[in-house]
């Protein structure tokens, strides 16, 4: 187990109760292999941190921006989604301190992204319990809300399909369409390959565990391919 003071330096926070931070990093799978571990897993802290994060971000947006409610809501969603939180957690080197089962340690794909995002929320919950709302809010304003200019500039508050449709209609006057190109795997673990087309031109493909996920990834790949 790594020295948590190194993580505290990265986070810019010193916990009075170190066990709260340790618990925030403890995934349920770790307890399955270490049933005598003295702390619980992080899911209750995650539940608390999720609410603290949403309130702090809402307060920040309300005070700093006069934009309409719908716009603020979409900005908030982009700031607190799992992809954003996982990215910030990686930047803060939280990945090196997670307590996981041996199986989870080997998985570095989408599952790890969710684990990192949940650990970030749990850490915010732990910070709230340890230092109060103001300290938790300061942490959020130090690492999370500064991502907003990038979100606005790159339209990350809009899902890829919406962004692609707007760009395609504006640039070429055509609405993209989607088609399942391939479907494989058993019913409980399907994999879909989806193509996105401009008229009859294949712009890009995307894969996912559902048609919707495949469409979103195809749209994302199309945006990258066209430089939109």
Image (spheres, helix red, strand yellow):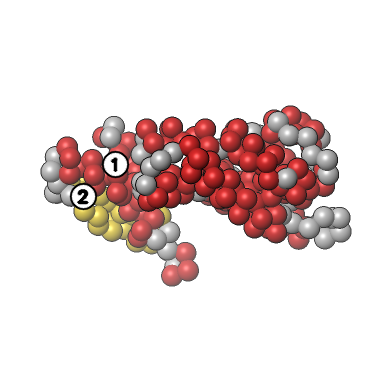
How packed mark 1 is, by other alpha carbons closer than 10 Å (few <14, some 14-19, many 20 or more), is many
Per the rendering, the mark at residue 222 is 1
The quarter of the picture where residue 28 lies is bottom right
Would residue 50 be found to the left or right of residue 130 on screen? left
Observer-nearest residue: 96 or 75? 75
Residue at the image position 52 percent from the left and 47 percent from the top: 58
Secondary structure beneath disc 1? Answer: helix
Whether residue 188 is visible, yes or no, is yes
Residue 171 as seen in the image, left or right of residue 40: left
Q: Nearer the viewer, residue 150 or 174?
A: 150
Identify the secondary structure beneath mark 2. Answer: loop
**Residue at the image position 32 percent from the left and 36 percent from the top:** 224
Which residue is drawn at the image coordinates 43% and 70% (left, top)?
187
Q: Position of residue 86 (x, y in %)?
A: 56, 43
Query: Mark 2 highlights which residue?
Result: 176
Determine whether, in the image, residue 181 is placed left or right of residue 201: right
**Where residue 5 appears, x then y in whole percent?**
80, 33
Q: Residue furthest bottom?
A: 187
Q: Which sits in the foreground, 87 or 180?
A: 87
Quarter the C terminus occupies: top left
Tell me if I can see residue 204 in this picture.
no
Measured as percent of width and height from the top left, residue 33 is found at 78, 57
Dot 2 and dot 1 residues touching (CB under 8 Å): yes
Q: Earlier in the sequence, mark 2 or mark 1?
A: 2
Q: Residue at x 82, y 47 (%)?
A: 19
């Amino acid at each position: 187990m790594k020295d948590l003071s190194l993580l505290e330096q990265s986070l810019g926070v010193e916990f009075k109760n170190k066990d709260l931070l340790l618990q925030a990093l403890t995934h349920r799978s770790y307890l399955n292999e270490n049933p005598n571990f003295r702390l619980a897993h992080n899911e209750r802290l995650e539940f608390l941190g999720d609410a603290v994060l949403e309130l702090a971000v809402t307060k920040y947006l309300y005070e700093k921006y006069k934009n309409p409610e719908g716009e603020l809501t979409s900005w908030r969603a982009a700031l607190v989604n799992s992809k954003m939180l996982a990215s910030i957690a990686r930047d803060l080197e939280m990945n090196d301190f997670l307590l996981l089962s041996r199986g989870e340690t080997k998985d570095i794909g989408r599952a790890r992204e969710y684990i990192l995002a949940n650990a970030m929320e749990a850490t915010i919950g732990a910070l709230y319990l340890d230092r109060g709302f103001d300290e938790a809010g300061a942490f959020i304003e130090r690492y999370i809300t500064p991502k907003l200019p990038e979100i606005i500039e790159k339209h990350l508050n809009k899902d890829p399909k919406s962004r692609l449709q707007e760009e395609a209609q504006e640039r070429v006057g055509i609405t993209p369409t989607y088609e399942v190109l391939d479907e494989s795997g058993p019913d409980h673990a399907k994999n879909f390959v989806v193509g996105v087309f401009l008229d009859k031109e294949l712009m890009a493909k995307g894969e996912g565990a559902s048609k919707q996920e495949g469409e979103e990834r195809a749209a994302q790949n199309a945006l990258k391919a066209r430089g939109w």
